[in-house]
Image (cartoon, helix red, strand yellow):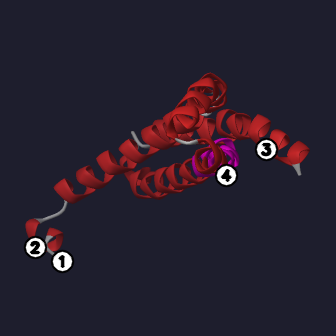
Amino acid sequence: MLPIIAMIMEWLPRISLWILAPAAVLLFVLAFSRAARGHCLLGFMIVASLSALLLLIGVVLVVGGYGNVVMHVFQNFGPIETIDFVATLVPSIGSQLGSLLPVLGTAAGAGLAAFVLRRQARGSQPASQVMR
């Protein structure tokens, strides 16, 4: 099971950098065409949701494995030792979470682009259609 988790953690940022980020850049370029904005809006929402899903999987794999251990240390040794234990874990967890920054950037950028396109689509419609 551990090799599978290690493989997933190694490939999550690569999936984001090589598949989702280029798709977001392509959608950004296509968003300048007025005819393609509706499709770009849907594409940005899909990219943002897939990036958020990859980010969730990565965070669960990094932090979830330590949760049981921290609770065990807390129950057996008390809060002071638990704080010391968590303080020693933070640098290793931080480096693993740092590798997920491209995934976070892709999710945030695609979500922001979808929000901006949606606001522009609402602004270009007549007021009677916006209220529906």
Q: Residue at x 61, y 22 (%)?
A: 91
Q: Residue at x 52, y 55 (%)?
A: 49
User: Residue 132 shows which numbered tag?
Assistant: 1
Q: Which residue is mark 4?
A: 68
Could you tell whether 10 is left or right of 24 in the image? right
**Of discs 3 and 2, which sits in the foreground?**
3
Span highlighted in magenta in the image: 55-70
Q: Which structural element holds mark 3?
A: helix
Report the residue that reaches farthest toward the bottom. Answer: 132
Q: Which residue is mark 2?
A: 128
Q: In the picture shown, does residue 42 fall above or below 96?
A: below
**Of discs 4 and 3, which sits in the foreground?**
4
Q: Are marks 4 and 3 in contact (CB under 8 Å)?
A: no
Give the image quarter of residue 19. top right
Q: Nearer the viewer, residue 102 or 98?
A: 98
Q: Residue at x 64, y 47 (%)?
A: 76
Q: Which residue is mark 3?
A: 8
CA gap, disc 3 to disc 1? 44 Å
Name the amino acid type tagged 1: Arg
Identify the main secondary structure in magenta: helix
Q: Residues within 10 Å of mark 3 (few under 14, many from 20)?
A: some
